[in-house]
């Protein structure tokens, strides 16, 4: 009997369209894996077993099945995006348990393409931090279960890395796709502004948050991005040699990047040089004030999202984060800090097509009850391991995380690719070249 666990979304959809397998068979096999493994991984807040099987049958009965790009593909959705008939808790006890009346636009697009939503995945409270734990569960890295999967799309990343779904939907406001993807050995892309519908929380963290795919291959990430963007076809890259800048420097003063991540970047740079690109060392002109700018935007976004909930039910770290953010909100809302950063970095990206950096500075923190710890503990832990993602939310430019190499523990290592506005297709093309020359095992060996 053919197993569909561990297959890519592209492979599954092709088999469903060709009637080699039914959507119900594919979904049932993935639901069985969730039931076996999620007690150890903690990816899901809720699993829609009965509803998913019924919806799989509806996909099978659709006219034009052979035209659905994600026919019968199981997908997980981050628990800050509405799924019709399910509550959206955003990792908190302070949010309402009422079912959503309609799908978020990105969920609707996935379903229209033939995907089946099997569940909603765990997030940290209000999707604030780069670790995923709280009242609804703890998401662990399937490659290293003693460590957090990352955040805030930690449950979605853990679900894909554990083979519970081939693709998942997440979003990224300060690195929330790229951080867990880097931890869990996945491919992701945070698209630039207005490529994919946002609609995340109340104002998308001042326009910094974007929805995007989590996948095991560049091909799956490209396909899912096309569906989310509503283009119908995968974005096409440019042709010819690209000018690639390689930087090992942390944008955050005082934070250093550990050897496994710098080694991965050097090796990736060698691969791209052999592929014919112009590769040279060059650091973006990060301003000294970047850390303060990032902190102000990070906290202010939380202040806005916390406004509509009962603060007494929020954890202490979230309350403190929001309280600090309320003092920054007026300045952040003006947008001047982000505009200054864009103007400072634009000349660099006029000279270079792609920036290659480490995805993280060090491996992720231990899977622990971080939600019970103080605000300073959480901010220090997050800043120490994930300083390289926030600049590209502040600018609104596309950025990817691509698995490349391994850590001493055997867990994945990763690099980050960044481009100017509109360069999503070029980033995916460069990521594909890295993947081709340095393939990564797609599913963590949990069984």
Image (cartoon, rainbow, N blue to C red):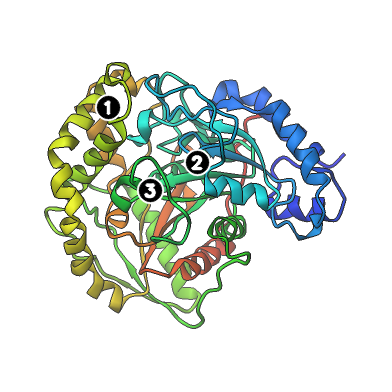
The earlier-in-sequence mark between 2 and 1 is 2
From where the camera sits, is residue 26 visible?
no
Q: Secondary structure at mark 1?
A: helix
Mark pair 3, 2: CA separation: 15 Å
Residue 83 location, quadrant: top right
Residue at the image point whose x is 45% and y is 47% from the top: 413
Looking at the rendered image, the disc whose residue lies closer to the viewer, 3 or 2, is: 2
Q: Which residue is mark 1?
A: 318
Mark pair 3, 1: CA separation: 32 Å
Left or right of 221 in this view: 296 = left
Left or right of 144 in this view: 319 = left
Q: Which residue is mark 3?
A: 260
Q: Are discs 2 and 1 less than 8 Å apart at CB?
A: no
Q: Residue 18: x, y in percent?
A: 85, 56
Residue at the image point whose x is 56% and y is 63% from the top: 437
Left or right of 149 in this view: 349 = left
The earlier-in-sequence mark between 3 and 2 is 2
Q: Which residue is mark 2?
A: 184
């Amino acid at each position: 009997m053919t197993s569909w666990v561990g297959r890519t979304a592209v492979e599954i959809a092709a088999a469903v369209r060709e009637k080699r397998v039914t959507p119900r068979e594919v979904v049932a096999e993935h639901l069985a894996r969730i039931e076996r493994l999620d007690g150890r991984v903690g990816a899901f807040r809720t699993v829609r077993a009965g509803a998913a099987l019924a919806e799989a049958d509806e996909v099978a009965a659709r006219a034009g099945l052979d035209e659905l790009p994600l026919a019968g593909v199981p997908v997980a959705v981050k628990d800050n995006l509405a799924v019709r008939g399910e509550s959206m808790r955003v990792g908190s006890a302070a949010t309402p348990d009422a079912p959503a009346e309609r799908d978020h636009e990105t969920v609707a697009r996935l379903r229209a393409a033939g995907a089946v939503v099997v569940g909603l995945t765990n997030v940290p409270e209000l999707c604030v931090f780069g670790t995923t734990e709280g009242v609804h569960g703890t998401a662990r890295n399937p490659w290293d279960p003693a460590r957090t999967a990352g955040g805030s799309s930690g449950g979605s990343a853990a679900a894909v890395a554990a083979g519970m779904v081939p693709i998942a939907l997440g979003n990224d406001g300060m690195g929330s796709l790229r951080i867990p993807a880097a931890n869990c050995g996945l491919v992701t892309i945070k698209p630039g502004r207005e490529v994919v519908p946002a609609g995340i929380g109340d104002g998308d963290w001042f326009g910094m948050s974007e929805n995007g795919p989590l996948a095991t291959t560049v091909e799956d990430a490209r396909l899912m991005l096309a569906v989310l963007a509503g283009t119908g076809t995968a974005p096409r890259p440019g042709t010819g040699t690209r000018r690639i800048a390689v930087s090992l420097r942390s944008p955050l003063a005082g934070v250093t990047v550990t050897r496994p991540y710098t080694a991965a970047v050097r090796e990736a740079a060698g691969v791209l040089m052999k592929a014919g690109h112009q590769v040279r060392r060059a650091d973006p002109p990060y301003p000294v004030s970047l850390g303060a700018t990032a902190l102000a935007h990070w906290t202010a976004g939380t202040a806005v999202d916390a406004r509509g909930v009962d603060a007494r039910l929020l954890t202490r770290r979230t309350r403190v984060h929001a309280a600090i953010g309320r003092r920054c909100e007026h300045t952040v809302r003006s947008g001047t800090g982000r505009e200054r950063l864009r103007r400072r970095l634009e000349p660099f990206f006029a000279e270079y097509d792609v920036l290659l950096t480490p995805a993280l500075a060090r491996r992720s923190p231990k899977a622990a009850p971080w939600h019970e710890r103080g605000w300073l503990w959480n901010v220090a832990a997050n800043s120490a391991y994930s300083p390289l993602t926030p600049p590209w939310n502040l600018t609104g430019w596309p950025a990817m995380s691509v698995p490349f190499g391994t850590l001493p523990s055997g867990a994945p290592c990763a690099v980050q690719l960044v481009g100017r506005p509109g360069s999503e297709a070029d980033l995916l093309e460069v990521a594909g070249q890295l993947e081709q020359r340095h393939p990564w095992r797609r599913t963590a060996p949990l069984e």
